[in-house]
Amino acid sequence: GNSVTQMEGPVTLSEEAFLTINCTYTATGYPSLFWYVQYPGEGLQLLLKATKADDKGSNKGFEATYRKETTSFHLEKGSVQVSDSAVYFCALSEKAGNNRKLIWGLGTSLAVNP
Amino acid sequence: GAGVSQSPSNKVTEKGKDVELRCDPISGHTALYWYRQSLGQGLEFLIYFQGNSAPDKSGLPSDRFSAERTGGSVSTLTIQRTQQEDSAVYLCASSAGNTGELFFGEGSRLTVL
């Protein structure tokens, strides 16, 4: 079945460091790919998405490119801030009949120190 | 409302009691999901409602868990005879259609003593 694998955390970085959180997937067909973020004490929210191969999703300085050849959707940011400290979830959306279900990675905790 | 609303935000109960958790999705969203998030764990899918279709209950961990969605809007997740391992944050999300983009509530934290 379809699955999502993301790098284990926690990841600890200093402010202004470069961030990469790896995400790879297995899927049949052409799923959409997502990164969700959960800030401390808040609900999950969509960070960015890509719906087809070679698409790049971007938001708040974060980017991820849908790479079909490597089945990856790695999250990157050039210069992290303390406010980026959160848990990041990679997910894919599969179509099953008329329904859509999301398959989730386990989440990667990021802590950014000043 | 403007976002997905869940209540209660916190619930402490004794083992063996029944609990009900409520989710009010974004108006007009046809899809509604319940997930469970345990400490240090990822998201565990519980149940999915899409319009008038039969719900996908494949994630419910036992027959103590059930959910309803009345009138295609508000949903209630019921846990009967709660156990300590039911302690978790229960998340509700809604979606406008077949996009896969979900809008989450802040969750209901359940503690079973």
Image (cartoon, rainbow, N blue to C red):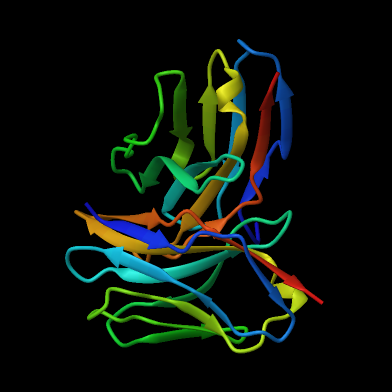
Residue A21, x across and y down, in percent: 50, 72
Residue A104, by quadrant, is bottom left
Residue A67, x across and y down, in percent: 30, 81
Q: In what quadrant of the picture does the N terminus of chain B appear?
A: bottom right
Residue B27, by quadrant, is bottom right
Of residues A1 and B5, the one nearer the viewer is: A1
Which residue occupies 61% across, 85% down?
Answer: A18
Q: In what quadrant of the picture does the C terminus of chain B appear?
A: top right
B88 versus B62 height, above or below? below
Q: Is residue B22 left or right of residue B10?
A: left
Of residues B113 and A8, the one nearer the viewer is: A8
B96 versus B68 height, above or below? below
Residue A99, x across and y down, in percent: 28, 54
Q: Is residue A88 left or right of residue B64?
A: right
B39 versus A42 height, above or below? above
Residue A110, by quadrant, is bottom right
Do we see residue B97 in this rendering? no
Of residues B89 and A6, the one nearer the viewer is: A6
Do we see residue A71 in this rendering? yes
Farthest-out residue, right = A114
